Amino acid sequence: MIIPIDDVKINNRIRQDLGDIDTLAQSIEKMGLIHPVIISEKYELLSGYRRLQACKKLGWDTIQVKIVTIGDDDLKKIDWEYHENIGRKDLSVDETKRYVAKRESFMAPKYKSVWSKLVAFFRRILFFWRKKD
């Protein structure tokens, strides 16, 4: 569901340190919002505060959300934020290096493929000229 970004209500959050919002904003700008923010049926933010702030920084007027029915259960509300953040894990340095290497391999020219096509082309030409003789 997509709603106006200003309709999301931000109450007292556990997370105080937002970290590097610029990098997150750049990622969202490039890839889009991969995971919607989670809000209650009353549009109270449950998880995704950093994503929300990054989208605001990008100047978005609307945002994709997932609405969960939670009622007035303050314990469930705070649990949403907590469990959203404890379950994630950043990539290690080695995993980041593997990502970069794989990405570069996808972007590298496929010389073998080009070479194969050139060889096949010249074989067709030679075959054509041999046929004429």
Image: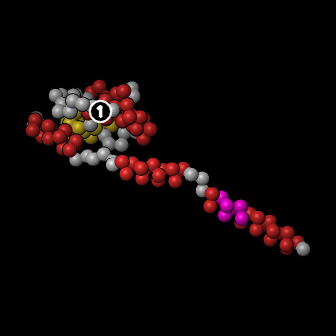
Q: Along the line of sight, which residue is nearer the eye, 33 or 15? A: 15
The figure's colour scheme reads secondary structure
Q: Residue at x 85, y 72 (%)?
A: 130
From the viewer's perspective, tell me whether residue 119 is left or right of residue 21. Answer: right
Q: Residue at x 85, y 73 (%)?
A: 131
Of 88 and 10, which appears nearest the observer? 88
Q: Which residue is mark 1?
A: 19
Locate residue 31, reporting x and y percent: 42, 41
Q: Is residue 128 left or right of residue 51?
A: right
Residue lying farthest to the right in this orientation: 133
Specify the segment rendered in magenta. 114-119
Judged by its main secondary structure, the magenta piece is: helix
| Residue 60 coordinates in the image, percent (x, y) | 38, 28
Image point 36% across, 39% down: which residue? 33
Q: Is residue 14 magenta?
A: no
Does dot 1 land on a helix, a strand or a loop? loop
The quadrant of the picture occupied by the C terminus is: bottom right
Depicted 6 relative to depicted 79: above or below: above
Q: Is residue 128 left or right of residue 84?
A: right
- Is 116 contained in the magenta span? yes
Residue 5 image point, x, y percent: 31, 28
Task: Report the amino acid beneath label 1.
Answer: Gly
Q: Is residue 108 visible?
A: yes
